[in-house]
C-alpha cells in the first residue's frame, strides 16, 4: 500500500454497508436534539414539530399558506338537502369563540396545529349538557394521555398556561367525550393519521425530517462559506520523509474532524500539525453545493403539503401557471384540512345543540374570491353540455334561481325543449 493509501486508512475511511433502509438516518433524541445516527424511526413529538415550524422557513410557509386561508373561509351549515344555512347558534360560537381571540386567530391556530401534527385540541367552556359558552385552543404539546383504552387514552391531562385540568373519557348518550370532573369543561381532540400502535397524530414532518434538517444545515453551511470568504477547497497528501504512524494519524484525523468538517466550519483555511503537499484545489460559487440540495428538499416539502409549485418555485411561476394553480391550492391543500376539522366538530360538538340532527359544518365556496374565476369557467363549460337546466348551471356558480330556469337546455344553441317544439323544430319525444 502506498503512502496515500496508508494515510487514508489512518484517517479512518471505512466502507459503509447499506441495509434495507440505507446506512444512516436523522433521528431526534429524548433531549430534543436532532442527530445523525443509524436508525429507522423518525417519529417526532408535537413540540419538535412546532420547533421545526419555527426554524425552517419552507415548513412555515407551506403550513401558513394552508392555515391562513382556512381561517378566512366563511362558515355555513348545510342541511340534508345541501341547503345553505347562514344563521345558527353553532356558527355564532365558531365566529366569536371567546372575548380573548378572534375567529381568524382561532381557526388559524387549529389549522396550524393540525397541519403540523395531525392533532388539534379545543376546550368547550360551560355545562357539558348545554351548548358551549366559549371555545379555546390548546397546542398538542400541552396534552398528555394516560392509560390507553381502545384507541384513545381514558384520561387526557392538559398542562397549558391557560388550562391545567384533567379530562376523563366518559360515555354520555352513546358518545365518548372527555369531560372534566366538574362537568363544566369538555376537551375535544381532533386527531387524523396516527403513528402505528399509538393514539397520537402522525406529523407529516416525520417523513420530511431529513429535508427539514438539510435546509437548516444548508443555510448555515452557505452562510459559513460567505463569512469565511469562501476559501477554495484543497486536497493534500502527507509530505514527510517518514511514514505517519497510527498515533499521528489519529491525531491528524481528530484535528480534521473537530475543526474542518461540518457546515459550521465550511470555508475555513486548512491548518494541520504535519507537513502536507497540495495535490489540487478548486473553488467558486458552485462550491455552495447545498443550494441544489435545498431546492430539491423545498420541492419535497411543498409537495407533501399539496402546495402547487407554480405558487412557490420561481422556475414554474408564470402568470398562466399561477392562475391555474390557485384552485388546486384550495381543492388539494386547504379544503381537505378544513373539512376534516369541520367533520370532527360536527360529530363531537354540534350534538350539544338542539334540533341539530342532519346539519353539518361547512364553508361557503362561492365567497372565496380566488375561486370565482374557476366557477365562471365551470359555468361556461357546462353551457355546452346537454341535460342541465339554466338554474342548475347557475347553482354551480353560486347564483340564485331565475324564473324559467328549470327548462333543460339542449344543443349548442342552448334552446329549451319548449322553444324547440314551438318554433317548428318538430315533435320532441
Image (cartoon, grey):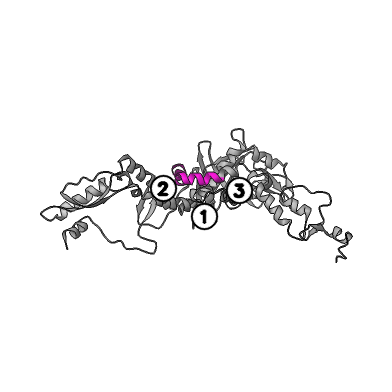
Position of 13 compared to 106: left or right? left
Q: Residue at x 70, y 46 (%)?
A: 77
Position of 121 compared to 351: left or right? left
Q: Which residue lies under the disc numbered 1?
A: 194
Q: Nearer the viewer, mark 1 or mark 2?
A: 2
Q: Residue at x 28, y 44 (%)?
A: 231
Q: Nearer the viewer, mark 2 or mark 3?
A: 2
Q: Of label 1 and label 3, which has the lower sequence position?
A: 1
Q: Residues under labels 2 and 3: Cα distance? A: 28 Å
Image coords of residue 386 (percent x, y): 76, 61
For the question of whether residue 170 can be seen, the reply is no
Q: Which residues are magenta?
A: 47-66
- Disc 2, disc 3: CB below 8 Å? no
Image coords of residue 275 (percent x, y): 15, 49
Residue 162 among those drawn in magenta: no
Q: Residue furthest left?
A: 241
Local packing at callout 3 (Cα closer than 10 Å; few below 14, some 14-19, many 20+) is many
Q: Of label 2 and label 3, which has the lower sequence position?
A: 2
Q: Nearer the viewer, mark 1 or mark 3?
A: 3
Q: Secondary structure at mark 2?
A: helix
Between 14 and 423, the one nearer to me in the picture? 423
**Where, quadrant-wise, is the C terminus in this rendering?**
bottom right
Local packing at callout 1 (Cα closer than 10 Å; few below 14, some 14-19, many 20+) is some
Q: Secondary structure at mark 3?
A: helix
Local packing at callout 2 (Cα closer than 10 Å; few below 14, some 14-19, many 20+) is many
Q: Secondary structure at mark 1?
A: loop
Residue 65 among those drawn in magenta: yes
**Where, quadrant-wise, is the N terminus in this rendering?**
bottom left
- Disc 1, disc 3: CB below 8 Å? no
* Residue 338, disc: 3
Image coords of residue 382 (percent x, y): 72, 56
Q: Which residue lies under the disc numbered 2?
A: 215
Amino acid at each position: 500500500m502506498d503512502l496515500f493509501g496508508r494515510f487514508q486508512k489512518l484517517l479512518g475511511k471505512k466502507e459503509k454497508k447499506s441495509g434495507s433502509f440505507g446506512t444512516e438516518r436523522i433521528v431526534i433524541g429524548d433531549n430534543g436534539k436532532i442527530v445523525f445516527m443509524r436508525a429507522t424511526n423518525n417519529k417526532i413529538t408535537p413540540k419538535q414539530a412546532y420547533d421545526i415550524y419555527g426554524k425552517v422557513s419552507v415548513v412555515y410557509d407551506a403550513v401558513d399558506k394552508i392555515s391562513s386561508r382556512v381561517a378566512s373561509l366563511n362558515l355555513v351549515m348545510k342541511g340534508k338537502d345541501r341547503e345553505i344555512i347562514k344563521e345558527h347558534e353553532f356558527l355564532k360560537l365558531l365566529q366569536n369563540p371567546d372575548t380573548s381571540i378572534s375567529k381568524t386567530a382561532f381557526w388559524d391556530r387549529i389549522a396550524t396545529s393540525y397541519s403540523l401534527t395531525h392533532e388539534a385540541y379545543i376546550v368547550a367552556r360551560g355545562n357539558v349538557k348545554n351548548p358551549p359558552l366559549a371555545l379555546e385552543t390548546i397546542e398538542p404539546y400541552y396534552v398528555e394521555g394516560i392509560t390507553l383504552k381502545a384507541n384513545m387514552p381514558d384520561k387526557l391531562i392538559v398542562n397549558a398556561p391557560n388550562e391545567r385540568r384533567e379530562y376523563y373519557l366518559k360515555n354520555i348518550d352513546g358518545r365518548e367525550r372527555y369531560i372534566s370532573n366538574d362537568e363544566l369543561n369538555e376537551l375535544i381532540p381532533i386527531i387524523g393519521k396516527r403513528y402505528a400502535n399509538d393514539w397520537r397524530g402522525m406529523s407529516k414532518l416525520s417523513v420530511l425530517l431529513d429535508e427539514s434538517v438539510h435546509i437548516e444545515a444548508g443555510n448555515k453551511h452557505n452562510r459559513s462559506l460567505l463569512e469565511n470568504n469562501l476559501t477554495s477547497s484543497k486536497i493534500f497528501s502527507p509530505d514527510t520523509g517518514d511514514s505517519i504512524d497510527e498515533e499521528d494519524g489519529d491525531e491528524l484525523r481528530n484535528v480534521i474532524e473537530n475543526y474542518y468538517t461540518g457546515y459550521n466550519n465550511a470555508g475555513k483555511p486548512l491548518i494541520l500539525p504535519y507537513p502536507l503537499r497540495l495535490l489540487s484545489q478548486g473553488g467558486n460559487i458552485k462550491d455552495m453545493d447545498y443550494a441544489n440540495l435545498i431546492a430539491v428538499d423545498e420541492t419535497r416539502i411543498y409537495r407533501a403539503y399539496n402546495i402547487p409549485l407554480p405558487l412557490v418555485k420561481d422556475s414554474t411561476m408564470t402568470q398562466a401557471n399561477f392562475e391555474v394553480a390557485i384552485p388546486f391550492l384550495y381543492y388539494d391543500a386547504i379544503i381537505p384540512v378544513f373539512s376534516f376539522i369541520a367533520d370532527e366538530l360536527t360529530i363531537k360538538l354540534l350534538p350539544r345543540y338542539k334540533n341539530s340532527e342532519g346539519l353539518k359544518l361547512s364553508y361557503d365556496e362561492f365567497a372565496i374570491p380566488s375561486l370565482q374565476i374557476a366557477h365562471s369557467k365551470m359555468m361556461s363549460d357546462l353551457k355546452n353540455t346537454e341535460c342541465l337546466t339554466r338554474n342548475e348551471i347557475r347553482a354551480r356558480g353560486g347564483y340564485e334561481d331565475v324564473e324559467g330556469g328549470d327548462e333543460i337546455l339542449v344543443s349548442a344553441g342552448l334552446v329549451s325543449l319548449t322553444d324547440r317544439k314551438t318554433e317548428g323544430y318538430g315533435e320532441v319525444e
